[in-house]
Image: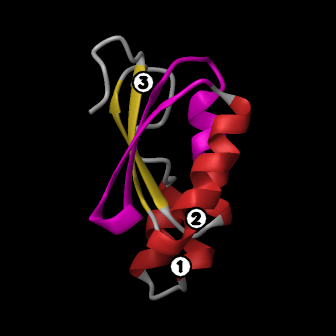
Amino acid sequence: MISDDAEQVYRLSVTPSDAPKIASSLLKAYDLELGFDWMGGLIWIGGKGAGLGQKVRQTIKDFNGHATLMRGLKGIVEMWGVSAASCAACSTGATYKECV
C-alpha cells in the first residue's frame, strides 16, 4: 500500500465522512502516498518532510481524529502525539477535546 521509500508512515483513525477533507488538506501541503481502509475511517499516509508530522497532527486534531507514527523519525516526532498532561486529563474523565 505505502512504498518502502516513504520516510514517514502514519496511520490515521478518523470519521469516514471526514477522510476526503483530511486527505485533501494534507495533499495540498505535501506529496504523499495515501491508502484508505475501513470505508475511509483508516487512512495510511506515506511521505517525507520535516514538517509532515506537525501537519498531520494539526489536521487530525481539527477533525477529532487520531494519528500514530508507524515508521520514521521517532526520535524527532512524537510517536503518539499525546502529551502526559493530556493523558492525565483523559484519565480523570475529561472530554475528548480536553485531552488533545
Quarter of image, res 73:
top left
Estimate how packed mark 3 is, as few (under 14), some (14 to 19) or many (20 or more) residues with alpha carbons within 10 Å. many
Q: CA distance from mark 1 to mark 2?
A: 7 Å
| Residue 41 visible | no
Q: The residue under label 3 is which amino acid type?
A: Gln
Looking at the image, residue 63 sits to the left or right of residue 17; the answer is right
Residue at image mark 3: 8
Residue at image mark 1: 96
Residue 8, percent from left and from top: 42, 24
Estimate how packed mark 2 is, as few (under 14), some (14 to 19) or many (20 or more) residues with alpha carbons within 10 Å. some
**Secondary structure under the numbered disc 2 in the rendered image:** loop
Q: Earlier in the sequence, mark 3 or mark 2?
A: 3
**Secondary structure under the numbered disc 3 in the rendered image:** strand
Q: Which residue is situated farthest in the top direction here?
A: 5
Residue depicted at x 60% and y 29%: 52
Mark identifier at residue 100: 2
Q: The residue under label 1 is which amino acid type?
A: Tyr
Residue 24, percent from left and from top: 65, 48
Is residue 87 found inside the magenta-colored segment of the image?
no
Relative to the observer, which residue lies in front, 80 or 22?
A: 22
Relative to the observer, which residue lies in front, 86 or 73?
A: 73
Q: The residue under label 2 is which amino acid type?
A: Val
